[in-house]
Image: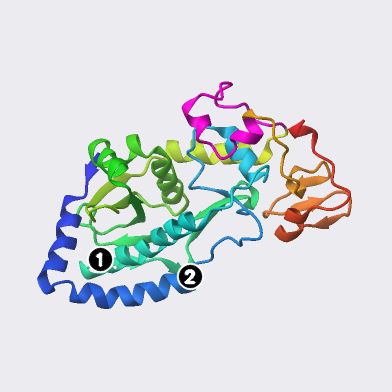
């Protein structure tokens, strides 16, 4: 674990210098910026792409079922508030690092900076890029912001990102590789007490290549990947959103993505072989009267 102690000290010193006055001014600007750029997935259907934030998960079958829309966990009000808090935390971090004198970029023509792969079916959005970290001077790096409960935050502080939050580590490696960056400044805050943890993650191109290849494997799969465990009592399985369709044989959600007629094409396209047309996300979610469950799910 490589702590970003100098960067953390600069952030704290900037706040203490004027009681947070500069930070508060920058926060107002940052909130407007992320509000304009934020494009949440429509509540009408699940996420369209296989996300880089998920690609480090243990189970390849979960990734495939999720991307194929075999299930959909709709979030309640509490979870929606929780996600919104994480989104707003991005503005706080942007204001904090700017107040400390760092240069940041988090938009590309008014939109979030993105990556894409696996024929346009895989991707993700960067929180931003940063220049001026004393730990890695004269280089642009990735910015990644995360929020934690006290229990998980203490584990992060003790063990570091790679060990305690492997999914986050993999996600950062994907972004760094796609944008040719050599490091990431990983910024974490504890929601219980507002303690912060800053860590430098160095680029690992081997790791990035392995997980980008995993995304391609998921997208090109012609059969359901093997479960990470045959036991429904396995820890990862017990808390998995795909548990009911994977271990309890509940029906697959009826969408075009699980239909025998659908073809996965380049540029993120889903093609209906029966109607000979490109399917919109809304059409995919609705399915039609000619739906036949794909043999991949039987």
Q: Look at 12% across and 74% down and name the residue there.
A: 18
Q: Residue furthest front?
A: 77
Which image quarter is the C terminus in? Answer: top right
Q: Look at 56% across and 25% down and name the residue there.
A: 232
The secondary structure type at the circle numbered 2 is helix
**Mark closest to the chain's N terminus, 2 or 1:** 2
Residue 2 at least partly seen: yes
Q: Position of residue 59 (x, y in %)?
A: 54, 32
Q: Is residue 32 magenta?
A: no
Q: Residues within 10 Å of mark 1 (few under 14, many from 20)?
A: many
Q: Residue furthest top?
A: 231
Q: Position of residue 127 (x, y in %)?
A: 41, 59
Label 2–label 1 contact, CB within 8 A: no
Residue 111 in the figure: left or right of residue 251: left
Which residues are the magenta region?
223-246
In the depicted view, which residue is nearer to us: 16 or 219? 16
Please determine whether, in this image, residue 145 is positioned above or below residue 3.
below
Residue 18 in the figure: left or right of residue 37: left
Q: Which residue is mark 2?
A: 37
Q: Position of residue 165 (x, y in %)?
A: 37, 40
Please determine whether, in this image, residue 278 is positioned above or below residue 254.
below
Q: CA distance from mark 2 to mark 1?
A: 19 Å
In the depicted view, which residue is nearer to us: 50 or 282? 282
Q: Which residue is mark 1?
A: 96
Residue 64 in the figure: left or right of residue 129: right
The secondary structure type at the circle numbered 1 is helix
């Amino acid at each position: 674990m490589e702590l970003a102690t100098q960067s953390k000290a600069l952030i704290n010193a900037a706040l203490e210098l004027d009681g947070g006055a500069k930070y508060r001014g920058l926060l107002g600007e940052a909130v407007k910026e992320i509000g304009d750029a934020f494009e949440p997935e429509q509540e009408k259907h699940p996420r369209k792409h296989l996300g880089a934030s998920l690609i480090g998960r243990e189970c390849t079958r979960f990734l495939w079922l999720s991307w194929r829309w075999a299930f959909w966990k709709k979030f309640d009000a509490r979870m929606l508030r929780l996600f919104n808090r994480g989104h707003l935390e991005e503005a706080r971090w942007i204001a904090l690092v700017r107040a400390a004198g760092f240069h940041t970029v988090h938009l590309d023509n008014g939109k979030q900076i993105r990556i894409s792969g696996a024929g346009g079916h895989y991707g993700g959005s960067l929180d931003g890029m940063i220049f001026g970290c004393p730990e890695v001077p004269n280089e642009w790096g990735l910015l990644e912001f995360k929020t934690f409960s006290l229990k998980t935050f203490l584990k992060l502080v003790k063990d570091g990102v790679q060990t305690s939050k492997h999914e986050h580590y993999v996600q950062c490696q994907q972004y760094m590789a796609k944008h040719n960056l050599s490091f990431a400044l990983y910024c974490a805050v504890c929601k219980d007490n507002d303690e912060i943890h800053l860590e430098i993650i160095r680029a690992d191109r081997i790791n990035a290549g392995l997980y980008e290849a995993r995304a391609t494997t998921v997208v090109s799969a012609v059969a359901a990947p093997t479960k990470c465990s045959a036991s429904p009592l396995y820890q990862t399985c017990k808390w998995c959103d795909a548990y009911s369709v994977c271990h309890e044989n509940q029906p697959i959600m009826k969408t075009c993505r699980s239909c025998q007629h659908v073809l996965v094409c380049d540029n993120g396209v889903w093609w209906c072989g029966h109607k000979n047309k490109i399917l919109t996300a809304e059409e995919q979610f609705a399915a039609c009267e000619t739906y036949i469950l794909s043999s991949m799910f039987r």
